[in-house]
Amino acid sequence: MKTLYIDVYFLINFTVDILSLYFAAVFSKIPTTTKRLIISAAIGALVSVIAVLLPERPLIKLIFSAVGLFLMGYIAPKPMNLRRKIKFIFSFIIFTALVGGAVTFIWDIFDKYLSDLFTDAQGGAVNRKMLIMSVIVLLSIGVFKMLVSFFSNNQSEESAMIEISFLNNTAVMSAFVDSGNLAVDPMDMSPIVLIKKDAAKTILPENIIELSNIDSLDRGIKKRIRLIPVTRGGETHVLIGVKADSVKVINGDNREEIRVTVAIDKEGGSFGGYEALMPSAALSNAIN
């Protein structure tokens, strides 16, 4: 009699789900976080375990699994508009099918060529195969991250026009879209848009730029000031940042708001002739 251990079954489904979610996030360029990936994968693994325990009614299991996939795809991305959520869910379903097919292929190889290595009298073969596949999946995440890192360094240059508003001031500036800009706001993990000091003077008060006489500012404004650690050339610098009223990407007549933190580069970076430096992740970080 074969025995299936629920904890092992949960583990293999968790690792497959987190890999599928990670692939979907990278290829759809929809921002997420490690916490969201873990929570979503855990929900998917729990749904799979419950599905095994449900009565043998295919329609009930199908509906239950479909609801689980939707919840995973909806929870994993950061808060954003419904259109981008649907885009992520669609990508996730595709990668779930691809990863599921790959796992089935590996499972068949184990059964056909390596069954003697797993078989025992207590029926532990299934569980050992699941554990080994979980390890393979976890290792593949590391390999995939290295490939993504390699190819991201070869992306073509892009630029965008952005509009930044703070209090009663609004400025439109050109931004270089940089895939290597990985700085984030430590308060909410949102991407960082770097702007030159001269550009900052058009929208921000002098005491925020110089971080002086802060007590004269309104309490609500003081809460929007950030200290942003940024690594350059192996050294860590602390930049002054602020949560603007809005930051929008201009595309023709359309203006799409993105969730970012604005940081001031007072060291005189060239930004390739642009006024701002925007991470590529910010373009997918749209909000309603």
Image: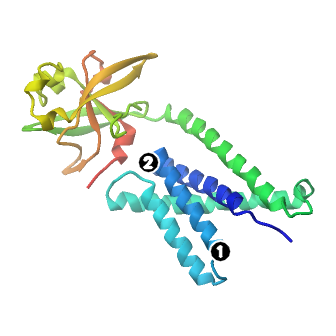
Closer to the chain start, of discs 1 and 2, is 2
Q: Which mark is residue 14?
A: none
Q: Position of residue 229 (x, y in %)?
A: 36, 24
The residue at the point 23 percent across, 39 percent down is: 162
Mark 2 secondary-structure assignment: loop
Horizontal side, residue 167 vs residue 177: left or right: left
Q: Looking at the image, can residue 104 be seen?
A: yes
Judging depth in this view, the residue of 49 and 194 nearest the camera is 49
The residue at the point 88 percent across, 61 percent down is: 112
Give, as a three-letter code, the residue at label 2. Answer: Thr
Judging by the rendered image, the residue that carries numbered circle 1 is 53
The residue at the point 20 percent across, 35 percent down is: 223
Q: Looking at the image, can residue 24 be seen?
A: no
Judging depth in this view, the residue of 122 and 260 nearest the camera is 122
Locate residue 269: give its quadrant: top left
Horizontal side, residue 175 vs residue 96: left or right: left
Q: Position of residue 134 (x, y in %)?
A: 70, 51
Q: Position of residue 203 (x, y in %)?
A: 12, 31
Judging by the rendered image, the residue that carries numbered circle 2 is 32
